[in-house]
Image: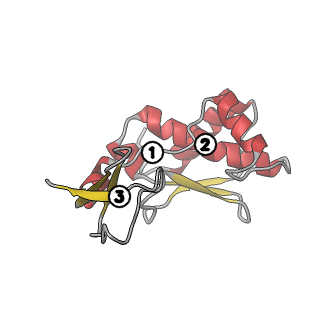
Amino acid sequence: MDLLNDNRSLYKLVNEVSIQYFQKPFLHQVQFNHRLRTTGGRYIPAKKIIELNPKYLTEMDEHEFIGIVKHELCHYHLHIEGKGYKHGDAEFKNLLRATGSPRHCRPLPSNEDRYKYKYVCNNCKHVYKRARRINVNQYRCGKCNGRLSMLEG
């Protein structure tokens, strides 16, 4: 079954995950959105559409992709039931835990090389990755307010 080229197969997968983890069918539309870059998927409440990033299917394992589907189904089912479906809502967090859904998806391997610069906090040793260079005299660590230094390499 080739999910990337067949919308029926994608819908079937999402419906199976919905029935298995939520004991409810998925009744609306699911599609791939090739424009998504930094997220695995999104739920659009006004249209009741789930959009998924196809790169997570090609670059990551199936377990990661199923986790993204479960996360978006949490938004979907809570919205349909009129409950708190946003990331900050307690009902959403509880349903994530109950279904074993991830809160965030892992970064794509293809996006790892976009970070050219690394900075480390001199106090707590937290590492910050940045695509653009920053002025270390102007910025501080967000965790402990310590001074930052650029890492070489």
Q: Earlier in the sequence, mark 3 or mark 2?
A: 2
Q: CA distance from mark 2 to mark 1?
A: 19 Å
Answer left or right for 24 relative to 71.
right
Q: Secondary structure at mark 3?
A: loop
Q: Residue 51: which quarter of the image?
A: bottom right
Disc 2 marks a residue whose amino acid type is His
Left-right relation of 120 to 90 = left
**Hey, which quadrant is residue 64 in on the image?**
top left
**Between marks 3 and 2 in the image, the one whose residue lies nearer the viewer:** 3
Where residue 129 sits, quadrant-wise, is bottom left
Q: Which residue is mark 1?
A: 3
Amino acid type of disc 3? Arg
Compare marks 3 and 1 and give the one earlier in the sequence.
1
Q: CA distance from mark 3 to mark 1?
A: 48 Å
Place of residue 113 in the rendered image (x, y in percent of width and height, measured from the top left): 24, 55
Element under disc 1: loop
Q: Residue at x 47, y 50 (%)?
A: 144
Sequence-wise first label, 2 or 1: 1
Task: Give how far across and how far down residue 109 sits, in percent.
Answer: 30, 47
Disc 3/disc 2 C-alpha distance (Å): 37 Å
**Could you classify mark 1 by the number of other residues whose Cα lies within 10 Å: few (under 14), some (14-19), or many (20 or more)?**
some
The crowd level at tag 2 (other Cα within 10 Å; few <14, some 14-19, many 20+) is many
Tag of residue 147 = 3
The foreground one among 124 and 109 is 124
Amino acid beneath label 1: Leu
Specify the label residue 71 is tagged with: 2
- Residue 46: x and y, percent? 74, 65
Closer to the eye: label 3 or 1: 3
For numbered disc 2, what is the local secondary structure? helix
Nearer mark to the viewer, of 2 and 1: 2
* Residue 146 image position (x, y, % from top left): 40, 55
